[in-house]
Amino acid sequence: MSYEFDHVAQVVPDIAAAVDWYKKTLPNAKVLYQDATWALMEAGGVKLAFVVRDQHPGHLAWRVDEAELKRLAAAHGKEIKPHRDGTKSFYLEAPGGQSIEIICIEGSEYEKWLREQPTGTGSGSGTSVR
């Protein structure tokens, strides 16, 4: 069983404005995916997602394999939910109210993207399209 940090997600009122601000502030930031309700960027080897409040909470995400996702979901009484790119996950509330996403990317579009990245990039990544 392996746990790998995946991404941090921040709730923002305007996805496009958040992406623009980070692109201007961190010139090496790369937009991996963006639509009206979700965006994913990489900057300095860290994945940063922007989400809208009614779709995802702000959260920290850890990647696990499918067997571990199922085991943890059962242990916590949580339902695993699919995302539009084929990833699946559930959320937990950690002490202090922090939301934690446990995510599996096996068989997803994001997993394909990760495998296509040159060595040394794409690690610690999140989900590209939800």
Image: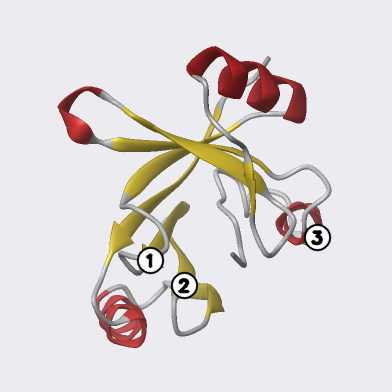
Crowdedness near tag 1: few (<14), some (14–19) or many (≥20) residues, C-alpha within 10 Å = many
Q: Residue at coordinates 42% horizontally, 72% vertically from top-left? A: 29
Q: Which dot marks residue 1?
A: none
Q: Nearer the viewer, residue 51 or 82?
A: 82
Q: Nearer the viewer, residue 73 or 58?
A: 73
Q: Amino acid at mark 3?
A: Glu
Q: Which dot marks residue 39?
A: 2
Q: Does residue 74 lie above or below 122 as drawn?
A: above
**For this view, does 95 lie left or right of residue 67?**
left
Which residue is the site of mark 3?
116
Quadrant of the image for the C terminus?
bottom right
Q: Could you say whether the residue bearing mark 2 is in a helix, strand or loop?
A: strand
Q: Residue at coordinates 28% horizontally, 86% vertically from top-left? A: 17
- Say whether disc 1 or disc 3 marks the residue closer to the N-terminus: 1
Crowdedness near tag 3: few (<14), some (14–19) or many (≥20) residues, C-alpha within 10 Å = few
Q: Position of residue 73 (x, y in %)?
A: 58, 24
How many marks the image carries: the answer is 3
Q: Position of residue 35 (x, y in %)?
A: 51, 83
Q: Amino acid at mark 1?
A: Val
Q: Does residue 16 lie above or below 129 as drawn?
A: below
Labels 1, 2: front one? 1
Q: Which dot marks residue 51?
A: 1
